[in-house]
Image (cartoon, grey):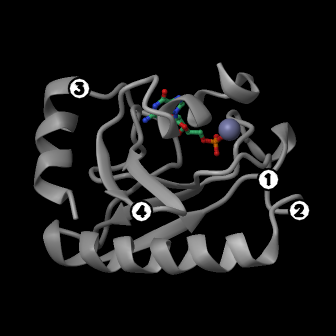
Amino acid sequence: MKNNCIFCAIAEGEIPSFKVYEDDVALAYLDINPFSFGHTLVIPKVHTEGLLDTPDETLAAVLARVKKIAAHIKTALPCDGFNILQNNGEAAGQTVKHVHFHIVPRMNGDTLFFENHKGDMDALKRLADRLRM
Ligand code: 5GP
Ligand code: ZN
């Protein structure tokens, strides 16, 4: 596996994902164990570990995709707001060492804790089909 990295394997198509968006720079897919309905991850295709080793141009390009995908999610799903999360280092809860942005859809009054819930693969597939841009 390239860079011994599961997100590189997803970007290379070696591991399947519930893809929502893809272009030459970035890829977005549903988190397999979502915090909330529609929880989406956005990654640059080129491997870097976190915010600090990622070139500014890549961050700018990926964040522009994050904005576009979040806007789409907000209209396509019941979604009153959203969080953007980006964890750096184990101390901050980073488990996958390929820089990524979480888009976490929120509903008014939800009592969301940022914790993973085991994903239902059929439901994730249906949701990705619905969200794909
Ligand atoms: P981190 O804690 O590193 O910021 O977030 C990693 C996220 O990646 C977690 O929310 C986890 O559920 C998700 N994740 C881990 N492995 C996979 C995978 O193979 N496919 C997908 N779609 N998400 C994954
Ligand atoms: Zn990687």
- Which of the two discs, 2 and 4, sits closer to the camera? 4
**Circle 3: residue type:** Asp
Q: Which residue is mark 3?
A: 120
Q: Which mark is residue 10?
A: none
The residue at the point 36 percent across, 27 percent down is 16
**Circle 2: residue type:** Leu
Q: Which mark is residue 50?
A: 1
Instruction: Say what secondary structure mark 3 lies in.
Output: loop
- Which of the two discs, 4 and 3, sits closer to the camera? 4
Q: Which residue is mark 4?
A: 23
Q: Nearer the viewer, residue 99 or 1?
A: 1
**Residue at mark 1 to residue at mark 4: CA–CA distance:** 20 Å
Displayed quadrant of residue 130? bottom left
Q: Nearer the viewer, residue 78 or 61?
A: 61
Q: Which residue is mark 2?
A: 52
**Circle 4: residue type:** Asp
Please report whichever mark, 1 or 4, sits nearer to the chain's N-terminal start: 4
**Residue at mark 2 to residue at mark 4: CA–CA distance:** 23 Å
The residue at the point 52 percent across, 80 percent down is 64
Q: Are marks 2 and 1 in contact (CB under 8 Å)?
A: yes
Q: Is residue 118 found left or right of 25 in the rendered image?
A: left
